[in-house]
Image (cartoon, rainbow, N blue to C red):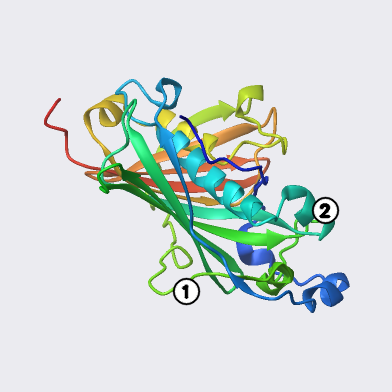
Amino acid sequence: MQGESRIGSVVFFQAEGGIREFCLSRGLGDVYKRQAAYRLIREFEKWIEVTEPECDLTHRMSLSNIMRHTQQMGSDHIAREGITYERMQQDGMVFLVNKMLITIKRRPVYAERLRLVTVPRVPKGAQFIRDTYFDTEQGERLVETSISWILADPRTHRILRPAAFDIYGLEMFPNDGEYITAYRIKKPNAAGVCHMRQVKYSDLDSNSHVNNAVYADIVCDTLPLDWLVEREIKKFGIMYQKEALAGQVIELDTAQISQSAYYVGGMAGGGRCFEAEINFTEKLQSY
C-alpha cells in the first residue's frame, strides 16, 4: 500500500548558502518571457501505510522519514504536471531546499494509514512555498510541514528569479497566512556540547552530499535518548546553509535552550552547513 499514487521523480538539491546569493542569470532572459497558457495547479494527494522500517524504537515514524515523505510529495506532484527532473535540467533550473518547519500533533505509528496532501503556494520574494499535511483516515491532522524552496541554475547553483518557472504555466495557490519565508533560528549565546560526525556513504544521496532528511537523524543523535523516547516532538525547524560532503567532519554544537527545546548547529568544510531547533512536549503519560 506504500505510496500507491507515486508518479515519477524530481530531484531536489540542498540550498548552498541560502537565498543570500540571489542572482538573475541573464542568459535565460528570453526563456523567462515564454509564457504558457496558465492553469491552476491542483492539490496532490496519496495514501500511504506506515511501514516498520520508517519507525523508531517507539514505533512512531521517525522525523527523517516525515521529511522524506514531505520532499517526495513535492517531487511526485510536479512530475504529475509533466515537469520532470530532465525537463527542468534542460530548461536550466533545479529546486533547492532552503528551510523546513514541521509541526507535530503526534507522529504516525506503525501500520497507520495516512492521507498525504501537498499544496504549492505563490512564491514570496525568491522563495517558493509548499505545505504538506499528514491526516488520518478519520481526518485528524497529525503533521503539518512547510518548506521554502529556491530555484537555481543546476550548473552554477546561482539563484534564479521565480519568474523563470512561469514557462510551465502553473498558477499556484495564494500564500496568505504562510509563515515559512520569515522563519529564522537564533543561535544561543551560551556554548553547547560539541559532537563530531563524519559524513559516510549512507548519509549521501544521488547529489553526493548529505541528504536533507539525514540532518534530522544527525540532530536526534546528539540529544538525550530519554527525551526522544519519553516525549513527543512538537516542532522541528531546520535551515540549510552549505552542503556537507563525503569524508567531511561535521562539528555539531548542541545546546538546551529551554526546558523543552534544543538548538543544534553544524559546521563542515569551513562553513556552517545547517542550523536546527527542536521542541518537545512534556513527558508522555505512557512513560
Q: Where residue 255 sits: x, y (%)?
A: 37, 41
| Left or right of residue 200, residue 177 in this image | left
The residue at the point 49 percent across, 40 percent down is 69
The residue at the point 69 percent across, 65 percent down is 21
The residue beneath circle 2 is 155
Label 2 or label 1, whichever comes before in sequence order:
2
Numbered circle sitting on residue 207: none
Q: Where residue 15 sits: x, y (%)?
A: 64, 53
The residue beneath circle 1 is 174
Q: Quadrant of residue 197?
A: top right
Which residue is nearer to you in this view: 242 or 252?
Answer: 242
Crowd tier of the residue under label 2, counting other residues whose Cα lies within 10 Å: few below 14, some 14–19, many 20 or above: few
| Left or right of residue 22, residue 223 in this image | left
Q: CA distance from mark 2 to mark 1?
A: 31 Å
Q: Quadrant of residue 54?
A: top left
Q: Nearer the viewer, mark 2 or mark 1?
A: 1
Q: Which amino acid type is marked by label 2?
A: Arg
The residue at the point 72 percent across, 60 percent down is 152
> Does 234 sit above or below residue 40?
above
